[in-house]
Amino acid sequence: MQLKTSNLKSTNKTFTVALLVFFGSLGAQEIIQDATPEVKVKDSVVNSTRVKVEGVAAVVGDFIILESDLDREIAQLEAQGADLEGVTRCELFGRLLESKLYAHQAIQDSVLVNELYIQSLVEQQIQGILGQTKGDMEGLLKFYKKDSEEALREEMYEINKNAYLAKEMQDKVINEIEVTPEEVRTFFNEIPEDERPTFGTELKLAQIVVIPEVTQEAKQAVIDKLNGFKKDIEENGSSFTTKVLFYTEDTASKPTGGKYTLNRKRPRMVKEFRDVAFSLQEGEISDPFETDFGFHIILLEKIRGQEYDVRHILIRPDLTQEAIQKAKDEIEKVRKMLVEGEVTFAEAAREFSDEKETKFEGGQLTNPITQDFNFELTKMEPELYAQIQDLKDGEISPIYQDEDRINRIKFKILTVTDRIDDHKADFAKDYLKIKELALQDKQIKAIEKWQKETIIDTYVKVNGEYRDCEFQSNWLKNQ
């Protein structure tokens, strides 16, 4: 029996979008205890001692899947804009079974959980949700049918922990898989010629970026301001967290009061930030220091072995109008030289561009997904596409004012250095793309093999209407 997605249960839209943006799989991922007393019916809640039998859709190892879990999974996908037309509930249910299988096997293999990371993630999620729902904790608890914030946090911890385990286990299965050049060639040659993929139009792009220079006076003003914060906290007992909420320009950490958890063995944040954080004593506030993102002060709250809980305030120096105009004048001069043929784009990039990542490549942009210089037109970021869509090969774009995480203002010009029209896959031209397809094919086969072997060795029970599903994997082996 095919269970269509058109029969989805309605979901409370007030909180669904906010919740699902932050949570991964929102299924109730309770772990069944080794010794479970007599099963009794109690509302629709499932805990370690009582379950509503008709609400349990499946059991995978130590995990249960409730009927409501699938509805939440579908609501999550819809909130993210996924197109579920033609996708059956059976197929989505199989996805839930897979996630529980990964999590169960991760526990069997003693995959370690970074508890501080999970706790930090829960805190970020709660603060983020409350930020979208105007701090309505009561409504959040009502949506989740929880009596207290503590109960909500416990459930969110389990959800995140099991999602973490599933991801770690999946990575463990495929991380060491590689493909040799001969395997890539064999993979390509085994594709019938009339079935070989077609790659869309691809462009090679280059850009020159000029960034307004920050004056020493502006830098010193920020240093003085941060020193004032430090003095007020140390001498007058002011709250570091309050100053974060009022002054920090790090929007990512502002909802959590500027908090990050650093690990000596797993680098996070830029080197300058880590070096300062790891040099502090508990309760100590650093002097102001500079990174590419601006100026910071750090409060070290707690050291737990290799884990450092820190809070920080980030402030970026102001740009003067004179500096902005000087940068604009310079890029206008560069563009004029290019249009008049006085210099090549690559030469101009190496001489004038302020973007370290591209200037020594003649301004050539690297595709962050494929790690080569080719950008497929239909998969290009909308903002970049809008800037180059009308450019002819070799033509110089107008001057664009842009920004990024580091720079409030930057000016840039772009050009198309090469164009490859729609074409069927060619081994020589498209080797990197074909290699990626070959790797994905090998990973899929490894996952299928792992699932087949692991399902055989794992207790799996599928209940009710889902026993009529035609799964790709052998989930019904015990039926």
Image (tube, rainbow, N blue to C red):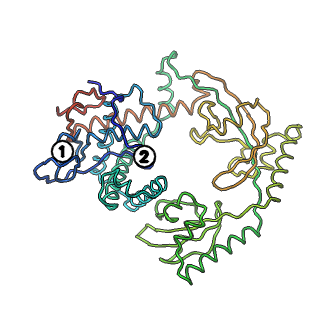
| Relative to 43, 272 lies left or right | right
Q: Is residue 381 above or below residue 139?
A: above
Q: Based on the displayed image, in which of its 4 quarters is residue 321 positioned?
A: bottom right
Q: Which residue is mark 1?
A: 52
Q: Which residue is mark 2?
A: 14
Instruction: Measuring from the top left, give residue 147's x and y in whole percent.
Output: 29, 58
- Which one is in front, 466 or 206? 466
Residue for point 35% across, 50% down: 143
- Check disc 1 and report its element: helix, strand or loop: loop
Furthest residue toward left: 38
Q: Is residue 32 above or below residue 191?
A: below
Disc number at residue 366? none
Residue for point 43% across, 31% down: 441
Q: CA distance from mark 1 to mark 2?
A: 27 Å
Quadrant location, the N terminus: top left
Residue type of the residue flagged with mark 1: Lys
- Label 1 neighbour load within 10 Å: few <14, some 14-19, many 20+: some
| Relative to 119, 379 lies left or right | right
Lower sequence index among marks 1 and 2: 2
Instruction: Measuring from the top left, give residue 236's x and y in whole percent.
Output: 56, 83
